[in-house]
Amino acid sequence: MALLRKALLTSIWFVFLTLPFLAVRVNTLQNEVEWRWHSLFYVGLAVFLLSVFIQVGRQLRQRRPLRPAGPTTIARFGHRLLTEASLYRPLLGLLTVAALLFPLIFDTAQTNILVLALIFVVLGLGLNITVGLAGLLDLGYIAFFAVGAYTYAILNSHFGLGFWLCLPLGGAVGALFGLLLGFPILRLRGDYLAIVTLGFGSIAKIVIENWEDLTHGAQGISGIARPGLFGLEFDLAGTVNYLYYLALTLVIVTIFITHRLKDSRLGRAWIALREDEIACAATGIDPALTKLSAYAFGAFWAGLVGVLFAARNTLVHPNSFTFMESALVLSIVVLGGMGSIVGVILAALALVLLPEYLRAFEEYRMLVYGAVMVLMMLFRPQGLIRPAGRRYKRPTAGDQEAA
Amino acid sequence: MTTVPLLEVTGLGMDFGGLRAVDGVSLSVYAGEIVALIGPNGAGKTTFFNCITGIYRPTRGAVQLTPAGGSRQRIDGLRPHRIASLGMARTFQNIRLFPQMTVLENVMLGRHCRTRSSLLGAILRGPNTRRQEAETIDRSYQLLEKVGLLSVADEMAKNLPYGGQRRLEIARALATDPFLLLLDEPAAGMNPQETAELDALIVRIRADDKVAVLLIEHDMKLVMNISDRIYVMEYGKQIATGTPLEIRHNAKVIEAYLGEGGDA
């Protein structure tokens, strides 16, 4: 009985909460208010059933004998899949083949969407260095992406420089801006850091919007050259496919380099900085240098892939670089699991592709997005994939006492 | 002793606004010594540690460090990581490990300031980088063996029991190849058995690694057992210094700290 009462109260509460935006509809054409009581009834019913379902499930779980605490079967299989070469090698091979064949199987529109997703994979991996590894919250990350995109757009439209020259330049300029942001905020942490980075993101957008001579302001810069390949000419499908392979290569290079760095002396220092800054300093690690390198390196990838973004769209526009994009990239890192490369890739694909394919539900996109975030934080706050500690083999084979 | 002290602190003072936390403390540690700094809670011992390791910038006084075979150098005002790379390592009263990293990685981070790597080296993983990495791992395993944590090398640091975390902090500090080790209440929260092991560990560190030790400690048994000399602080001031025997019979110290009868 208590169960039903609780379910009833929950459903009444939800009906009350959703009343303003589900039941009341203002018809602006006829200037009248429509009341849609039936939709409230559905909400109430759904919440009631869900509540009963959850409570029954909870009771069943409590009745069952307690299992020894530990990872579930799925989690354990997932862990083995990520750590055992005999399991992940074939999977990796399969994924590579699938990725290579994708543009041949699916049409141009699909490929084009996937290019965007791959761009966000690189962004996620870049921010993963700053936020996931070094633990420096950055709410204005998209500014570096904008810097890269505008570097190519400006150099191309004003000076006619080509894509391949601008690609490393975009990365370098991005890293430079990373350092520029890094210096003033060396002493900040937590909330203060978040606010300053948020401000930096806004400043970047405002500068772009108002520096008419250089950036063409709110019009954006159009007619940017697509990347060339030894002077070959492509048709539209060919161009998209070429961009796809470029993005794929960039993703693979990013994965390789960030993975190597994560497992290096510098990568360990980044993680240590996230864990405890004072302990870091007392252990002989320079926190300032470590912080700056994390910012610069995170920003480098954003700048680099920004060039690709500009080349894909052939136009850059300040509205591509709003706070929403920063939030999206940050969600990718949080959803994927701070510091986990595989997690970030999965999250980037999910968060970019799902909205694209759920265009039919466009009105509810942000609702679903928010719900996914809330559910994730409730049930899996560590993200999709929790980074596991790396094991190091003792090099001297003689005394293998370690279990 | 006619030799130059490894660490020489003269007239150190530290103010926090109107509060004088440390007031004119002078202290020196010579090679091969184990020196204890004791005093009631709030006497300013940890503040003193924070001043000489660069976490705070002292208001007055000088701190000079003389590495074995090196030249004398003033270190007050240097940043903590510089002081650590000069060869003075420390542990913390409230343990400060890297909780989400493995026990071994914690020690490997101690090697950071003794190794060099370039960005390109880390990405390409050339022979130099690999050799250096192997050396780091090897040395870290040795240190874990020394403090008795070899069997839990792959555990997350946060999962270690309290005593294990304290020993891990010592191993991490030793990984920086110090000539002087500062321990801030290493026995806090340990049971008598663990304290006895710690006692043996500190003596062994001095013997094997030629490391001098300066420690803050409340456990009088440990302090009286292993210290060559003791400094006593109260209300930020230095009130006594001497051998354990002298300190035990010093009227001022008994009054200020050991109280009625004392537990020594």
Image (cartoon, rainbow, N blue to C red):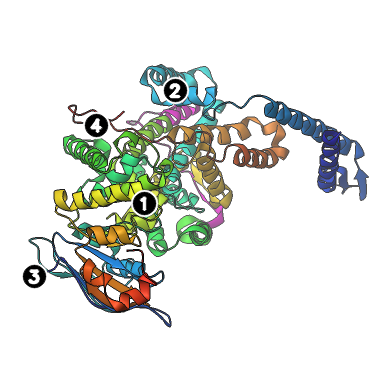
Element under disc 1: helix
Closer to us: B185 or A113: B185
Determine crowd level at label 3: few under 14, some 14-19, many 20+ residues with C-alpha closer than 10 A.
few
Residue B93 screen position, x and y as percent: 37, 59
| Same chain shared by disc 1 and disc 3 | no
Residue type beneath disc 1: Ala
Closer to us: A242 or B39: B39
Q: Looking at the image, do the residues carrying marks 1 and 2 touch, with CB atoms under 8 Å apart? A: no
Residue A103 screen position, x and y as percent: 48, 22
Q: Identify the residue at horizontal 40%, vertical 29% (top origin).
A: A233
Foreground disc of the pair 4, 3: 3
Determine crowd level at label 2: few under 14, some 14-19, many 20+ residues with C-alpha closer than 10 A.
some
Residue range (magenta): A217-246
Q: Identify the residue at horizontal 68%, vertical 29% (top origin).
A: A62
Residue A296 numbered mark, or none = 1
Question: Where does label 3 land, which residue?
Answer: B1
Q: On screen, B257 above or below A273?
A: below
Q: Looking at the image, do the residues carrying marks 2 and 4 touch, with CB atoms under 8 Å apart? A: no
Chain letter of mark 2 equals A
Closer to us: B185 or B241: B241
Q: Is residue A64 left or right of residue B249?
A: right
Question: Where does label 2 land, which residue?
Answer: A81
Residue type beneath disc 4: Arg
